[in-house]
Image (spheres, rainbow, N blue to C red):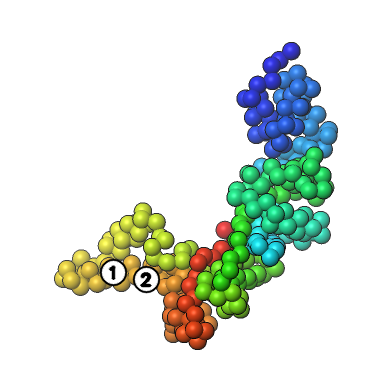
Amino acid sequence: MTLVTAELVKQLRERTGVGLSKCKAALDESQGNVELAIEQLRKAGIASAVKKEARETKEGRVEFFETPETLAIAELNAETDFVVNNDRFRQFHKQVVELLAKTKSATVSEFLEVEMPKDPTKTLDIMRKELMAVLGENIVISRIATIAKQPNRSLGIYSHMNGKIFVAVELDGCSKESDFARDIAMHIAAESPDYLKMEDVPAELRAKEEEIAMSQAPKDRPPQVLEKIIQGKIKAFYDQVCLLNQKYVKDNAITITELLAKKSKEASKNLTIVKFIRFQVGN
């Protein structure tokens, strides 16, 4: 009888995506024969989606779910829009975000191992694979995020293009400014900033942009003029990728920083953006 090692279990898991305990049981039953274990898992309906796992999943949507304590967001992808708009897919998607709001899982891999509340014998990953068998396409939970609701903070939520783009904005300074936070979320959906502020841009990216700016600047200018040109190019980069630097999409005479200052004065509150999340299917 072949000894079922941890390496064999790991190998079977990597090939099937099935949970460790199920892999161990299948290997015990097959006396360590990996191919036979895969066959047994497929007969049990657990690994019927193995061959579909390699297929591209370019279509999808983003769903969210709120509790009094948490906002949960998850992007699910499939191979075609036909499946993405299928009722079974959407029902599963709702189960996913409701479960995420309870577990507050930090990573997709951790989340996939969560046991289903109505059937603890199945993990979320097994449920996903069973749905793949029914719908005939690869289905992937590609991204998840949660935001814990805090006193004196507002959440703005905006979903666009039938869930193709989703934005959440967390605003500090007042618990009654969700409409204003949603206006900023709409701006983010349109302008797609990568960072909140200049300080958030990684040092290596800042260095790369400075190098590009220097290479593009004319070499026949005086040093002080050359420096202004380079700084102007770097500023233009920050104005593009940093939310606080961007011109407000509804009023391009002001930046988001200036918009916040204006709203803070009107509300007699110090309103600041804590964070934002922007999911766009495929990006």
Q: Is residue 70 in view from this perspective? A: yes
Residue type at tag 2? Ala
For label 1, count other residues whose C-alpha is less than 10 Å away and answer few (under 14), some (14-19) or many (20+). Answer: some
Rendered-image quadrant of the N terminus: top right
Q: Quadrant of residue 276?
A: bottom right
Q: Is residue 60 in view from this perspective? A: no
Rendered-image quadrant of the C terminus: bottom right
Residue 239 in the image: state x and y as whole percent.
Answer: 40, 71
Q: Residue at x 64, y 53 (%)?
A: 104
Q: Residue at x 75, y 29 (%)?
A: 38
**From what the image shows, is residue 182 above or below residue 134?**
below
- What residue would you read off at disc 2? 236
Distance between mark 2 and mark 1 Cα atoms? 9 Å
Identify the disc placed on residue 231.
1
Q: Residue at x 65, y 61 (%)?
A: 70
Number of numbered discs on residues: 2
Q: Residue furthest bottom?
A: 266
